[in-house]
Amino acid sequence: MILSIPLLAADHRAGTVFAITPGSRRVAAPHAWLAEHAGALRLPTGDHGDWAFADDRGGALVVAGREGIRRIPIAIPAEHLAAAPDGRHIVVTPGLGENAEAWNDVVTVVDLADDSSVRFRTRVGEPGVVVVPDRVTGEPTIVLRHREPGAIEAVRLTDALSLGAHVPVLRGTLCDDLADDGHGDVVDHGSGVLAVATGRGLERFAVDDGVPVALGVLPWPVEGRAFFLRRAADTGHATGVLRGGSADPSRWPEWTNAFAEIDLHTGASRSVPLPPGLVFRFALAAGIAAAAVIHPDGDALVVVDRDRARVARTVPLPPLTSPPQPGRMPWDAVDGRPAQRRAVAIDPATGVIAVTAGGDAAIHLIDGDRVETIEMPTPMDEGGHLLWPGGSGAFTDPVGR
């Protein structure tokens, strides 16, 4: 099986990132605990690096490029990552870590041109983040998405970069026309439009002369809502898997799923039904999407033909040794072991799809109906994290995935 470039596979529980090819495996970033919720960034090609992620134990943004690995200090635990349009500045917002309640309010802004960082305090509560151009002034603007109560806050990037030491409080202009349950952010840098996934729909905003303004809510095209959004670079649309069905997470085998693609400007949408069960995240490439569906009756990789809005093929996956259990929340530990799931990635040049087997120390490479399994030296607990960082046709998404 041929891969265009090595696949990056992070075992965030074991603190190692591997570079994988069918015939070899090497450590790409040792002693690095990828912040799984914040994910990783493909950066625009250039001198600043090719990919980046937050080390949630070492307190650093790990950046890889032609000169190797760099580590830039950041505040942790990290919950979200977002890059400015040119990829030079990256914003990291805080999460809970191993704590039951939100407690951290420290945002970090990293300048990859000189490997420096500055920090400021915002509102506690795991804010989402994107960086958008102001539609009036063109200035890069940090947009924080708050929950409970829902709000959008706009902070000029230059204001953050000019701060001094001692982590001062920095407040921006607020728009409170946002549902409290926001989870999932996407941005179109070309138009300056950003969108947030909520129970009300896809809520759109922009920043005009420093002020965040609501642009209206696009309804979800089918039952349910998305919790994870990606921007498709080939169409410019927001994409997500809509989860419907019971609000009781212990009944996750009954959850309905549908892949949806939505035009941020016109609201036009298409959706493709997927099998029921647990879909954690999905992978995206030109013309296709892929999702691993976990279900007690059998797991499967579902490949979506985005151009024709239909399922292209379904590939059965070898079962997980310790899958989520019906009647229990799917993210709860089982018999003292971490909750297991699957991560997915698509090689942008060859179309090969990688799927992890959480807890089973394995990655499955799928090309058509052919499945090849790579044994890993660490368990890949919780499914790990996968990234094809570049190569021909790779999407550069400015929000961590």
Image (cartoon, rainbow, N blue to C red):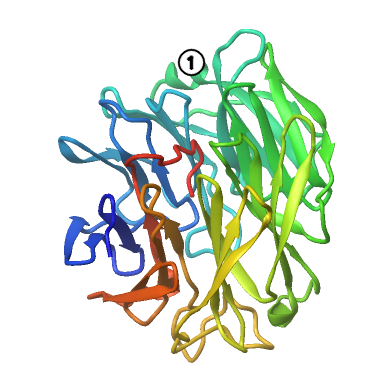
| Residue named by callout 1 | 158
| Residue 384 showing in the rendered view | yes
Return the residue nearer the eye: 372 or 180: 372
- x and y percentages locating residue 219 in the rendered image: 84, 46
Return the residue nearer the eye: 284 or 376: 284
| Residue 166 showing in the rendered view | no
Indicate the quadrant where residue 73 lies.
top left
- x and y percentages locating residue 280 in the rendered image: 57, 66
Q: Is residue 182 above or below residue 195?
A: below
- Left/right of residue 379 with respect to residue 277 in the rendered view: left
**Residue in view at x 16 percent, y 61 percent:** 26
Q: Is residue 69 above or below residue 385?
A: above
- Left/right of residue 331 with respect to residue 343 in the rendered view: right
**Residue in view at x 37 percent, y 35 percent:** 43
Return the residue nearer the eye: 350 or 385: 350
- Left/right of residue 302 with respect to residue 320 in the rendered view: right
